[in-house]
Amino acid sequence: MKRIIRYILIGLLVLLAMPILYAYLAYPAEYVNRALVWGIEDVYDYQKFSERALEASDSPFEFSFSLDEDRVRTQFEVVSGMDDFDAFLAKNRTQAFIVIQNDNILYEQYFNGSNRDTIVTSFSTAKSFTSALIGIAISEGDIHSVDDPITDYLPELAERDPAFKNITIRNLLMMSSGIKYEEFPFVSGDNVKTYLYPNLRELALEDTHIVGSPGEKFLYNNYHPLLLGLIIERATGTPVTDYLQEKIWDPVGMQYPGSWSLDENGFEKMESGINARAIDFAKFGRLFLHHGNWDSVQVIPADWIVEATREDPAVDRGEYYGNLEVREPLDGYYKYMWWGLPRSNGAYDFSAVGKHGQFIYISPQADLVIVRNGEKYGIPYDEWLQIFYQFAGAINRSPTP
């Protein structure tokens, strides 16, 4: 019996070791080591990667304070049914929570050991910055149009598979390229590869495969921002971080230095890696709230703000999204790396959303920006959006004391 048990244990060890051995044979050792040691991403990943610096502005913009924290707390408690808003935020692993209306800070609080100077990682809110940079590059003529085939800028894709000629920049922005994306199994899953691979340029150009028709189906896919980053890099002749510094970071007067995490070959982690302070992420929200205009300087074309955030009426939601949760609970939509929530009379709110509960939420009707950064979601992301949506509607209707 002991011998049988020993053989069973040896067999189990072999079974466990085989996938790891395969991983080391199939992928760079550095990547496998990262996947095994680091595992799932967390809010302190900015400490693990190399980075390219974003410099603070010499003339930082500062929001005015018109603190009305009790009113904010009350409104959130009413719309959500919670008893104690601050306790709710702390319990759900919030780091920063900021509410800005009419350019005035109504509420700014930090939790779980964080403060205004705490660095927070964007995760997928970086995708919304990437979309903005594409809009700027188009307005300045470095990129011709969202309808350009991506192979105009990345011709080696067509050399590997001519079908890449059918994918446009718009398809990447809409998350509907038809490029294969499977999150599992762990080491060979695309989610882990696009986050931890040491050479993201190589990954995006050589390990992408088309399995569907462009424009037909929504599929959240981290290869899309990587490819867009390559297009920005080639079209402008500038590293993406430097382009962000010049086109957005400096013009809006970011108060603190930041960075963009890099792979081992100096390419930005386009899917996730902007590291900054919550108050500076709020300025990006203000920029979109004001239609790309920053104190009389048009930083992003106003028509791009509309194009990037307003729902495409040509999209058949049922066919395009299928049963995906993007449509719940408020019948939302996705447009150019923003998540939209329609309101009545053609109005809508929109939000940049990142893993673990990073939000830049914008409600034009309420002249409102909400920033939430967290160590964890705490509650599902769609519940956060529902709370923000209801709060924006309530505070828009409630009189200011």
Image (spheres, rainbow, N blue to C red):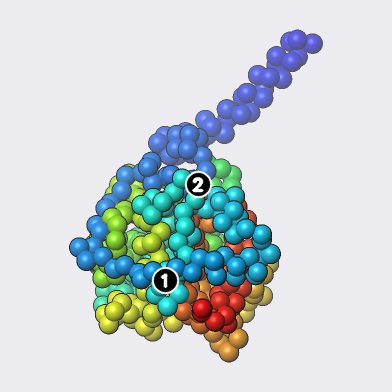
Mark 1, secondary structure of its residue: loop
| Circle 2 residue | 112
| In this rendering, the label closer to the viewer, 1 or 2 | 1
Residue sticking out furthest to the top: 2
| Residue 115, position as x, y percentages in the image | 41, 51
List the residue tagged with mark 1.
66
Task: Looking at the picture, tell me which residue is in the foreground, 383 or 222.
Answer: 383
For the point 33% across and 80% down, the residue is 293
Q: Residues within 10 Å of mark 2 (few under 14, many from 20)?
A: some
Is residue 180 visible in the rendered image? The answer is yes
Q: Amino acid at mark 2?
A: Asn
Image coordinates for residue 54, horizontal then vertical, percent: 27, 56
Kindly indicate whether the residue at mark 2 contacts the one at mark 1 (C-beta within 8 angstroms).
no
Can the viewer see residue 170 in this picture?
no
Image vertical order of residue 287 relative to residue 127, above or below: below
Nearest the viewer among 75 and 322 is 75
Q: CA distance from mark 1 to mark 2?
A: 24 Å
Give the farthest residue toward the front: 401
- For marks 1 and 2 on the same chain, the one whose residue lies earlier in the sequence: 1
The residue tagged with tag 2: helix, strand or loop?
A: loop
Question: Furthest residue to the right?
Answer: 1
At a point 33% along the width and 65% down the height, the residue shown is 231
Residue at image coords 59%, 44%: 185
Amino acid under label 1? Answer: Ser
The picture places residue 327, in percent across and down from the top left corner, at 64, 71
Q: Which mark, by number, is residue 134?
A: none
Identify the residue at image location x=56%, y=56%.
86
Left or right, 268 with respect to 192, comes to left
Image quarter of the N terminus:
top right
Q: Position of residue 4 (x, y in %)?
A: 75, 14
Classify 10 Å Cα crowding around label 1: few (below 14), some (14-19), many (20 and above).
some
